[in-house]
Amino acid sequence: MTNTAHSPGPLSRLTVLVSGASVAGLALALRLARYGARVTVVEKAPALREGGLAVGFRGRAHRTVLERMGIWDDVRRHRTRMGRRTIVGVDDKERADLPAFLMSGDVEIVRGTLLQIMYERTRDHVEYVFGDSVAHLQEDFDGIDVTFDRGAPRRFGLLVGADGLHSPTRRLVFGDETRHLRHLGYYAAGFAMPNVLGLHCSSRICSVPGRAVGISNYDGSPVRSDAFLLFRSQQLAYDHDDVAGQKALLAETFADLPWKHARHALDALEDADELSFDAIARIHIDRLSQGRVVLLGAAGCGATAGGAGTALVCAYVLAGELAAARGNHARAFAVYEAEVRDRATGRQKVPGSPGPFLAPSTENGIRTRNLVCRMLGSRFLAGFSERLAEKAARAIELKEYPIGIGDPVYDESRSSAAAVPFRNRQA
């Protein structure tokens, strides 16, 4: 978004606090700012999260949202260009390839790169507060008073919880997460590591019953790759903020995995500056909004793995409904829920959690998975499988919403008022 002059927009009187600098949170901030809203994003982490695993987008709806956000060209420019994703045995011999259309969609980008693109488009018009989080809120007739863990209390018109699977916003408004979180039987971790395998835009994945190690190079870097660890387990009690404890758990769980490159990943884990570790789980909740608070992305109806495309679409719909209702949140939230509920819950019902697929529980399950991958990648079935994936992606239909400031079809030559940039700060 540029600093060119523009008309105030349909949400110029609306103040919104977005909790969580997630894909969903930044996408919503971008759209709301283009409708003229004054948006603040508060993020518990000390800075924007870097790196991470790749996320894929598929079909007309995803591309339309990326284009309307004005970031399609940037996403294409920074796409991973991934080649082979090879499944190997513990002897490091190749067993099968994961089909690219299944894993990457039409375009794939590293999550941290996507966040950076949206941050660059919003930082002059959205206030970012890092190193803080929502601690308490009190709603009244015309707003919400928010108390933060570190910063001074403030008042907003709306609060959006885009703060992930363990959303503090959801806990404050809808109760403890034990009421909503459904564990799917696996845990996953990701972190950066040196490119000791010499990979170039490719991956190698080794599975043993109930466990998997993957090492990927997304951008052709000769020095960096990313590790992915996944294991089958009943629900564990652990401290989400205790990174050292999580590293110890992972080191113990994978210590005896016989693939020779697993040791490289565990060595890198010990020195990793950033670690993402969580259960593979889903959220089931009866409603996505209450009063002036609404949930977005994984906080409301998402899952641990995947879902970036759905998060973008839902952010686009929420912002669009608020603009169409000219800030009438009760009306906008009701339509938003109706629009995204079937889409989000429908995605949750689709089988194919990455846990059983990447780390089947038995040797026979691993052999069956490898056979299926070889069949999907065969010339005979490849076209049919791709058409099925494309058909599912085309099933999403997007409504038309008011045109936002800075949208590709917006005529800025008719504008009159200057945009007011916000100041980014730390709590």
Image: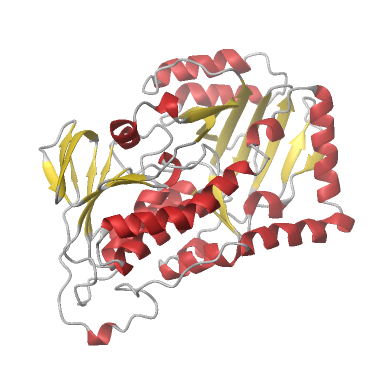
x, y percentage for residue 342?
Answer: 54, 52
Q: How many marks?
A: 0
* Residue occupying image coordinates x 34% and y 54%: 333
Q: Position of residue 398 (x, y in %)?
A: 50, 67
Q: Viewer-proximal residue, 341 or 12?
A: 341
Location of residue 213 with respect to 401 vertically, above or below: above
Q: Residue at x 23, y 87 (%)?
A: 414
Examine the rendered structure and indicate whether residue 136 appears above or below residue 59: above
Q: Residue furthest right?
A: 380
Instruction: Tell me: 107 left or right of 67.
Output: right
Q: Report whether 233 appears left or right of 327.
A: right
Image position, residue 379 (x, y; %): 87, 57
Residue closest to the eye, 178 or 20: 178
- Residue at point 26%, 46% (across, down): 291
* Quadrant holding the N terminus: bottom left
Q: Position of residue 71 (x, y in %)?
A: 43, 65
In the rendered structure, the answer to whether residue 241 lies left or right of residue 36 reads right
